Image (cartoon, rainbow, N blue to C red):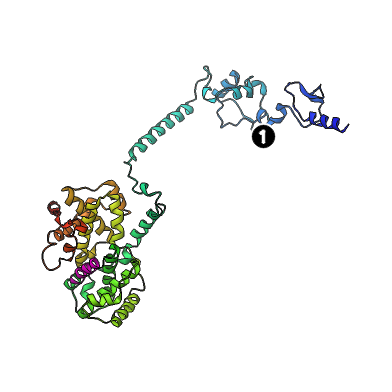
């Protein structure tokens, strides 16, 4: 008995494929005799069949000819109350079933019903807007810029996910590490020439110690920032130089030179105590702010954008290090120095101006165009011309070696001086 009840219950819930009703235990019962909540479609969709016509809705199809005539003559009055029902006899006899089985794109106005003027005007206006949008989209099309980081996606050290944000931060904060280009007027015992001699000597020391490139740029930055804040006598200038080198090595290098090594290269002029005392004085004057953008960080990014080879890279660093020695180059921000050095090197190697869209895009947020680089590049060309002459030849000797591919053999881009 229990099994038969279970079969009966399961049979109640199983729908039949017949349209007349449900089957239970082999017998067929009419649907109206079943005690359930099923209702006819006409009862469920009262909101559809008895919908109130809105005067603001254009019903393109579904009205009788009589109703269309009244609409054209503006004599039709629409019901305003929600509960007032339109006469269903005036509706299209096909009703909802017609719209459910017909593609909406194929629906058109009846041939005997002219298109109202406001519909024609609206369609014409939309066509005109579509045309304007197409023209605007054609105007804003630009040449795609090469993705210079696409090849480093699998290199975790390249931090491709953050590299754009990192360099955007460098560009925003590069002014924090700059000094006044006229700070030397406040020094009473040293001048621009003494500064040039000191930095030229430190470039040789840096090369002899085989230190990292970024160490040199940070050393020069620490010297200028300290001299801007403190007045010094000339006999302490070399002490400031070796102390700045020591601090930069502690910040950038894995293996830091010993203090005794710095005493030795200074020809025993200073004692260990003096160097450590100057180190304390320097970090206090700079408020322990060592992490500042230097031309080096921009050089690496811009060289990548320029798709440089080893020859272009070495020549670019040769030119920018020549600029480090010169006091007058302090008036240029680090990013501009880097961009101008690469631009000058490209002109020197190719004997023509070359500044690609990719390089221009990655120079700064506002981008440095060729015109903005010309003034700085002309100065760099003059330094390149006289690099092997005079007493300050530390940079020239460094880049004359085989390690740097004898970059000094490249001819200066003299044609830039005539532009």
On the image, the x and y values in percent for residue 227 come to 26, 74
Name the element at disc 1.
loop
| Snapshot quadrant of residue 174 | bottom left
In this picture, residue 249 sits left or right of residue 381: right
Q: Identify the residue shown where x is 12% and y is 68%.
A: 391
| Snapshot quadrant of residue 287 | bottom left
Q: Identify the residue shown where x is 29% and y is 60%.
A: 296
Of 227 and 34, nearer the camera is 227
In this picture, residue 297 sits left or right of residue 326: right
In this picture, residue 132 sits left or right of residue 7: left
On the image, the x and y values in percent for residue 328 come to 19, 65
On the image, the x and y values in percent for residue 142 come to 32, 41
Q: Can residue 237 be found in the magenta stretch? A: no
Of 50 and 408, nearer the camera is 408
In the rendered view, would you say 198 is above or below 155? Answer: below
Residue receiving disc 1: 82
Of 287 and 9, nearer the camera is 9
On the image, the x and y values in percent for residue 36 come to 79, 31
Q: Answer few, some or many: residues within 10 Å of disc 1's Cα (few below 14, many 20 plus, some between 14 and 19).
A: few
In the rendered view, would you say 258 is above or below 110? Answer: below
| Snapshot quadrant of residue 290 | bottom left
Q: Is residue 296 visible?
A: yes
Q: Identify the residue shown where x is 67% and y is 23%.
A: 88
In the rendered view, would you say 251 is above or below 55? Answer: below
Residue at the extreme left of the image, as rendered: 389
In this picture, residue 347 sits left or right of residue 115: left
Q: Quadrant of the N terminus?
A: top right
Of 95 and 369, nearer the camera is 369
What range is drawn magenta here? 197-208
Q: Identify the residue shown where x is 39% and y is 51%.
A: 155
- Which SS type dominates the magenta stretch? helix
């Amino acid at each position: 008995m229990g099994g038969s009840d279970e079969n009966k219950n399961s049979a109640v819930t199983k729908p039949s494929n017949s349209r007349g009703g449900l089957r239970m235990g082999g017998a067929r019962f009419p649907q109206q005799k079943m005690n359930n909540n099923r209702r006819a479609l006409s009862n469920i969709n009262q909101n559809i069949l008895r919908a109130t016509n809105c005067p603001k809705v254009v019903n393109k199809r579904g009205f009788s000819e009589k109703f269309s005539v009244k609409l054209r003559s503006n004599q039709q009055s629409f019901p305003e109350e929600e509960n007032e029902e339109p006469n269903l006899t005036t509706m299209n006899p096909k009703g909802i079933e017609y719209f459910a089985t017909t593609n909406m794109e194929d629906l058109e106005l009846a041939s005997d019903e002219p298109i109202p003027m406001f519909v024609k005007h609206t369609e014409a206006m939309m066509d005109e807007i579509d045309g304007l949008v197409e023209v605007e989209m054609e105007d804003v099309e630009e040449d795609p810029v090469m993705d210079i980081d696409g090849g480093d996606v699998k290199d975790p050290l390249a931090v491709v996910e953050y590299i754009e944000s990192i360099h955007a931060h460098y560009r925003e904060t590069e002014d924090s590490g700059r000094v006044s280009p006229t700070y030397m007027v406040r020094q009473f015992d040293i001048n621009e020439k003494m500064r040039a001699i000191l930095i030229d000597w430190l470039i040789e020391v840096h090369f002899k110690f085989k230190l990292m490139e970024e160490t040199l740029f940070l050393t020069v930055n620490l010297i200028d920032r300290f001299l801007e804040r403190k007045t010094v006598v000339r006999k302490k200038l070399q002490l400031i130089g070796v102390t700045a080198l020591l601090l930069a090595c502690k910040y950038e290098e894995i293996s830091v030179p010993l203090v005794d090594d710095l005493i030795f290269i200074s020809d025993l002029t200073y004692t260990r105590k003096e160097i450590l005392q100057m180190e304390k004085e320097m970090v206090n004057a700079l408020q322990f702010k060592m992490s500042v953008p230097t031309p080096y960080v921009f050089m690496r990014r811009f060289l990548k954008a320029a798709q440089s080879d080893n020859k272009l890279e070495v020549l670019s660093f040769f030119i920018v290090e020549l600029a480090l020695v010169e006091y007058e180059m302090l008036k240029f921000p680090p990013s501009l120095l880097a961009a101008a050095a690469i631009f000058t090197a490209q002109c020197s190697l190719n004997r023509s101006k070359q500044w690609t869209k990719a390089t221009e895009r990655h120079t700064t947020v506002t981008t440095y165009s060729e015109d903005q680089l010309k003034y700085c590049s002309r100065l760099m060309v003059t330094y390149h011309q006289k690099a092997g002459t005079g007493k300050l030849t530390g940079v020239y000797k460094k880049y004359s070696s085989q390690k740097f591919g004898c970059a000094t053999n490249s001819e200066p881009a003299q044609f830039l001086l005539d532009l």
